Image (tube, rainbow, N blue to C red):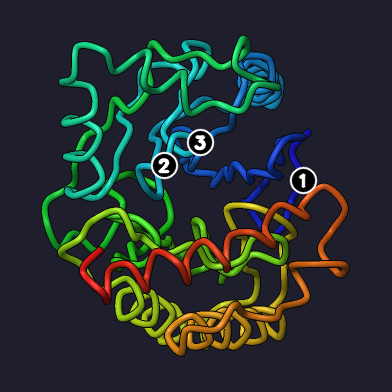
Amino acid sequence: MLSQVAEGVLVHQSALLENNAVVVDGPSGVLLVDPGLTDAEMACLAADLRKSGRSVAAGFATHPDWDHVLWHPDLGDAPRYGTARCAARMRDFRSNPDWRALAAEGLPPEIADDTPLDLFGLLTGLPPGATEIPWEGTRVRIIEHPAHAPGHAALLVEEQGVLIAGDMLSDVLVPNLDTLDDANDPIAEYLLGLQRLEAVAGGVDVVVPGHGSVGGADELHARIEQDRAYVLALQAGRVPGDPRVGPTAKPGWEWTTDIGADQVERLAERHNGG
């Protein structure tokens, strides 16, 4: 079911992982961001759009994690965009002859049989440094940054004051650093990502995270500070304390407690050249 969070901006949340698909109305169709996880829910989303007289004019993947680059035939063949780095990562992944098996291995077992992979990661990369979605609708700014994953980007729907944050600023999911690339500095990258989101926060009334609950302006600022404190604890080599982990974690999200300990271990290994 689509829920309106601002004028012309609607959200559909997946049952698993609370992924938020975002719909932005336009004059000749909608912009659809991170459309969902399973065949059934994406087909349902497409049906809901049709029933309301909407079609998909463009898609966007906020970053190259599996749960943000899915698509369904019922959503149509509109161009699906990502940043240049995001699209390049997907091209490299799909160039592996075993890409389908590798993608299937990463799926949660609860939805492995109901997640369509034919259109997985088929993205058109926007020019490096692109600052807006190329479509006929309201201006949607691209806030690209290196936090969490290569080519990650938030979107700012300026007129409505909605920030689509990708896998950041969640009330259920703690910061997850990109520690897979030995050449990067994941702490500095994440802090830079938060800085870029904070730079546009003054024009934001609603924040939609990739996972979890939609928040207002006050909650946006609180989440930025909470995520920054978490990352600074990791930088200091401490497993962060946080309301999103341990006994205060939302039921079903207790597994996020292990993310901090794993990241401290990985960061120590990188520091020691392990």
Residue 239 percent location from the top left of the image: 59, 77
Of residue 184 and residue 10, the one placed in the foreground of this image is 184
Q: Residue at x 36, y 67 (%)?
A: 147
| Residue that mark 3 sits on | 67
- Mark 3: give few (<14), some (14-19) or many (20+) Cα within 10 Å: many
| Residue that mark 2 sits on | 65
- Is 93 positioned to the left or the right of 255 in the image? left
Q: Which mark is residue 100?
A: none
Q: What is the three-letter code of the residue carrying label 3?
A: Asp
Provide the secondary structure element on which disc 3 rests: helix
Residue 160 visible to the viewer: no
Quadrant of image for the N terminus: top right
Of residue 133 and residue 270, the one placed in the foreground of this image is 270
Residue 128 percent location from the top left of the image: 11, 56
| Residue that mark 1 sits on | 3
Q: Are marks 3 and 1 in contact (CB under 8 Å)?
A: no
